[in-house]
Image (tube, rainbow, N blue to C red):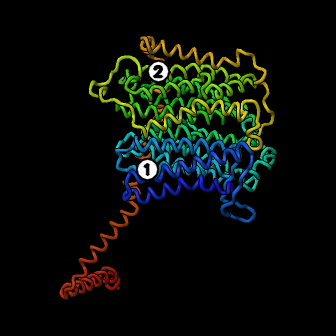
Amino acid sequence: MLYFLPIFIIFLPLIASIINGIYCKKISNCLASKISSFAIIISAILAAIIFVHSGIDKNTIHIILANWITIDSFNISWSIYVDQLTAIMLVVVTFVSAVVHIYSIGYMADDDNLPKFLSFLSLFTFFMLMLITADNFLQLFCGWEGVGLCSYLLIGYYFHKNSANNAAIKAFVVNRVGDFAFIIGIVIIALNIGSITFETVFDQVNVLTNQFIYFFDYEFTMLDVVCLLLFIGCMGKSAQIGLHVWLPDAMEGPTPVSALIHAATMVTAGVFLVVRCSFMFEYSQVVLTLITIIGAITCLFAALVAISQTDIKRVIAYSTCSQLGYMFFACGVSAYQAAIFHLATHGFFKALLFLSAGSVIHACHSQELHEMGGLRRKLPITYANFWIGSLAIIGIYPFAGFYSKDLILESAYGTSSAGNFAFILGIIAAILTAIYSLKIIILAFHGKTKLKDKDFSHAHESPAIMNIPLIILTAGALFSGMFGYYILDIGNSFGYFAGSIFNLDTPEHEHHLEPIIKYLPLIVGIAGSLIGIIAFKTTIYNWLATNFKFIYNILKNKFYFDELYDKIFVCPTKILSNFSAIFDNKFIDRFGPNGFSKITNGFSWCMCQVQTGYIFNYAFYIIMAIIFCITIFIVKYLPILWSA
């Protein structure tokens, strides 16, 4: 029976999505909520059972549902593959998704299109589950594109707002850049190995390592090229610097969407792909170094931008971008277990932070931190939840982030020059993480309120249907780190991930770290918290923003990435499209289809004038024709006759 549980885990959300989608205009919000919640909760319970069976007991499940594509010796099956890596991802995705579904029932209670919204959420979950249970690149890519489609639908859910439509299009287009590279990578694998099934590809990595490409006197293996292309795909999906610009704008969607995208689906897909393909990346040191550098820069860049943002959801969005940077540079130093560990703990406390932010927005009808203040007495449960989520992301003992983020920094230290670079930037980002986390708490919950008296007096705690999910998530933010570190022993070895993650050289140096290095992340987290309290409790932050306006504006405007891309890509594309439209209308259509059409119409009109149906007209034409012929004869032959 356990063997078939993954089928129910994956397809229950799809069934709920189909029912709510088809009957969205016919069923009530209450019934739609029950259908989607029941399906996701059952999936989460079954995922927990599979986690014990396949994760802890290390039993791999491989179910072939159907033969999909067969071309000569090239075979692809639609399969479900569950190992330790998949098992832990199943728990994170289904658990967070279940909590978000329940929360959405209260948050979107007044929305007339709630069945459609829940249908999109369930479909989002299904595609993510398809992605993590795939046993080949093509099936994974279908899930990959599916979560991209659902993100487009959910980010643009408030389609009556231009900002939401633009954000949805932006997310879709930016991700196409990474997806294009991903497709090329899959094609190269298929052409060189003759298969895209993970097991076959990982067993035949040497085929790619034995082929070389020369570029400006540098030698690269075909594996380097493939891994680079796969990583570019991951950069788009997981919002790494350069392809990160879609993630903050994704906040235009409803808050539950933000929680699901940032905590359990979409952005975690890139990290999962790198870890799943550790059997390939381990043999491409140049790409691992690049991943380390990109991840470290993203980590610091996003933390700097988060400090200057005033929208509560955008601060948390950039914190996601920063935490993803941690996960990627962990992969870059071959600490894949640390990356997945942080992905799991991050899923719990990031969902907690986003849904808590949703409660704040629900209470005061504003997302601007400078319009809030004094909410701790009005929203005591939300206030406590925000503290727990913030302490977890800062990495304060004994919260989840203390174990997972510290493990990443310990793994990076002393591994290589790139690892030390990542460690330094990660430590600085840890300080900034504490500062922007305290910024939210102090500006939203402390001090005098900036809300209107009417809005402040009506502010109240969210209903139980929204608060219960938050309380559940606090358990994850509190205990998931200890569970992973002590029970699963993720911190000391590859014991839990044996067989599902590959590493050429198992890192042991973290056991011999100096005490100052081991506890430095905790120290800087506490120091950053104190700095944040002082900066935002006093006027220091405002003084710095005023006196260092140039730097502040750079951070406030997100290093002008949007403006830069607008000048480099958007404006030239608009100019080209306008020229193309003018050329098409004025030249192609004028002298092409429209020109031929006008000539044909003119000829037809002339023929209509001739074919009148009156005998006297035809007699006139005959006489004129005779006269014309006689005239030609006279002009041509009369001089000859005359001369004769």
- Dot 1 falls on a residue whose secondary structure is helix
The spot of residue 298 in percent (x, y) is: 59, 29
Q: Going by the image, does 438 lie left or right of 323?
A: left
What number is the disc on residue 439?
2
Residue at 43% in and 49% down: 117
Q: Amino acid at mark 1?
A: Ser
Q: Secondary structure at mark 2?
A: helix
Pointer 1: residues within 10 angstroms few (<14), some, or many (20+)? many
Instruction: Indicate the position of residue 534 as horizontal and vertical percent values.
Output: 48, 12
Residue 120's tag is: none
- Judged left or right of residue 460, residue 235 is right
The residue at the point 54 percent across, 17 percent down is 529
- Can the viewer see residue 432? yes
Identify the residue under disc 1.
Answer: 33
In-front residue for pair 308/33? 33
Say which of 281 and 373 sits in front: 373
Who comes first in sequence, dot 1 or dot 2? 1
Specify the quadrant of the image occupied by residue 513.
Answer: top right
Q: Nearer the viewer, residue 410 or 145?
A: 410
Q: Quadrant of residue 404?
A: top right
> What type is the residue that disc 2 sits on?
Lys
Residue 134, how many percent across, how many down?
A: 66, 52
Residue 144 seen in the current view: no
Q: Nearer the viewer, residue 267 or 363?
A: 363
How many other residues sit within 10 Å of disc 2, few (<14), some (14-19) or many (≥20)?
many
Q: Quadrant of the N terminus?
A: bottom right
Q: Is residue 593 above or below residue 137?
A: below
Q: Count every numbered label the image shows and give the total.
A: 2
Whole-angstrom CA distance, mark 1 to mark 2, is 35 Å
Which quarter of the rendered picture does the C terminus lie within?
bottom left
